[in-house]
Image: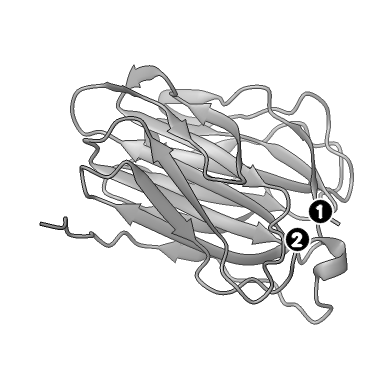
């Protein structure tokens, strides 16, 4: 049984030089559902979300951060979340609600990727280890940052993924982000899961992305323990000559 996207924030709130943004659902969450909050931040790390939220993964780069937070088995009645930045910064976030996610032990695998090759127009982000089960929910937070003139670009999701929201598609600005998902990873047990997103314009300082997968109820092993937060530090990839 695959997960279903129940609802999502109608817009991707963006802040310039702010210390927080607040994505808001069209109605309050249903108890027991999985809430996911993918985040893009320029030059600042998210430091806190309210009690109950857990950071699954953070991918750093020289120009921005991609993060994914989640609230498993939420108590219901949640309609928004305040995403607090470490310092005043530019950033965006989205709030997504899914059903058919596996209770308090929902998180399976995470991963991250970054490229500083200025000619790249795509980036693949892959889980660091094989996923345990089939039919998992996959969420990604992807970004592209320019350290110079504002640039108009469009980020597109990889095959099998849906872009649930974006920050700056077809808008002339320095930072761009998008939040994608795949409701059913298919026969993924024992293999890694990945997304390759694309951009219409290169010349960036960095492309970066984070990925997280979540169990569905029929796939969650009973002996699972909560996973620790994963922070992935950027490693430069030399250009091929």
Give the residue displayed 64% in from the left and 71% down from the top. Answer: 131
- Quarter that holds the C terminus: bottom left
Q: Tag 2: Cα neighbours inside 10 Å, few (<14), some, or many (≥20)? A: many
Farthest top residue in view: 171
Q: Tag 1: Cα neighbours inside 10 Å, few (<14), some, or many (≥20)? A: many
What secondary structure is marked by label 1?
A: loop
In this figure, which residue is indicated by the disc labeled 1?
Answer: 2
Q: Where residue 197 sits: x, y (%)?
A: 45, 44
Mark 2 and mark 1 in contact? Answer it, CB < 8 Å: yes
What secondary structure is marked by label 2?
A: loop
Q: Nearer the viewer, residue 145 or 45?
A: 145
The image shows residue 127, relative to residue 42, as above or below, that is below
Q: Nearer the viewer, residue 221 or 30?
A: 221
- In this rendering, position of residue 227 left or right of residue 205: right
- In this rendering, position of residue 208 left or right of residue 106: left
Quadrant in the picture for residue 213: bottom right
Instruction: Please say whether residue 45 is visible from this viewpoint.
Output: no
In this figure, which residue is indicated by the disc labeled 2?
Answer: 135
Give the residue displayed 52% in from the left and 39% down from the top. Answer: 157
- In this rendering, position of residue 55 left or right of residue 220: left
Instruction: Please say whether residue 82 is visible from this viewpoint.
Output: yes
In the rendered picture of this protein, how many numbered marks are placed on residues? 2
Q: CA distance from mark 2 to mark 1?
A: 6 Å
Farthest bottom residue in view: 223
First in sequence, mark 2 or 1: give its number. 1
Give the residue displayed 32% in from the left and 41% down from the top. Answer: 121
How does the figure colour the protein chain or chains? one colour
Q: Where residue 23 sits: x, y (%)?
A: 63, 29
Q: Where residue 95 sits: x, y (%)?
A: 66, 36
- In this rendering, position of residue 32 left or right of residue 169: right
Quadrant in the picture for residue 79: top right
Give the residue displayed 60% in from the left and 67% down from the top. Answer: 109
């Amino acid at each position: 049984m695959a997960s279903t996207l129940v609802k999502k924030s109608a817009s991707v709130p963006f802040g310039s030089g702010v210390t927080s943004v607040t994505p808001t659902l069209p109605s309050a969450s249903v108890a027991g559902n999985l809430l996911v909050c993918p985040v893009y931040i320029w030059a600042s790390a998210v430091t806190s979300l309210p009690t109950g939220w857990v950071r699954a993964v953070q991918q750093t780069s020289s120009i921005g951060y991609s993060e994914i937070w989640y609230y498993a088995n939420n108590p219901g009645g949640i309609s928004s979340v305040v995403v607090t930045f470490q310092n005043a910064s530019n950033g965006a976030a989205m709030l997504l609600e899914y059903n058919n996610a596996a209770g308090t032990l929902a998180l399976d695998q995470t991963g991250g990727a970054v490229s500083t090759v200025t000619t790249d127009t795509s980036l693949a982000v892959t889980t660091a280890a094989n996923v345990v089960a089939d039919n998992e929910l996959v969420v990604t937070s992807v970004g592209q940052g320019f350290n110079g003139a504002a640039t108009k670009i469009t980020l597109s999701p990889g095959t099998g993924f849906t872009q649930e929201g974006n920050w700056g598609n077809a808008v002339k600005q320095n930072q761009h982000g998008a939040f994608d998902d795949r409701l059913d990873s298919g026969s993924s047990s024992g293999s890694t899961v990945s997304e390759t997103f694309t951009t219409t314009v290169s010349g960036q300082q960095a492309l970066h992305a984070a990925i997280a997968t979540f169990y569905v109820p029929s796939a969650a092993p009973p002996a699972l323990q909560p996973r620790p937060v994963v922070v992935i530090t950027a490693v430069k990839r030399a250009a091929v000559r």
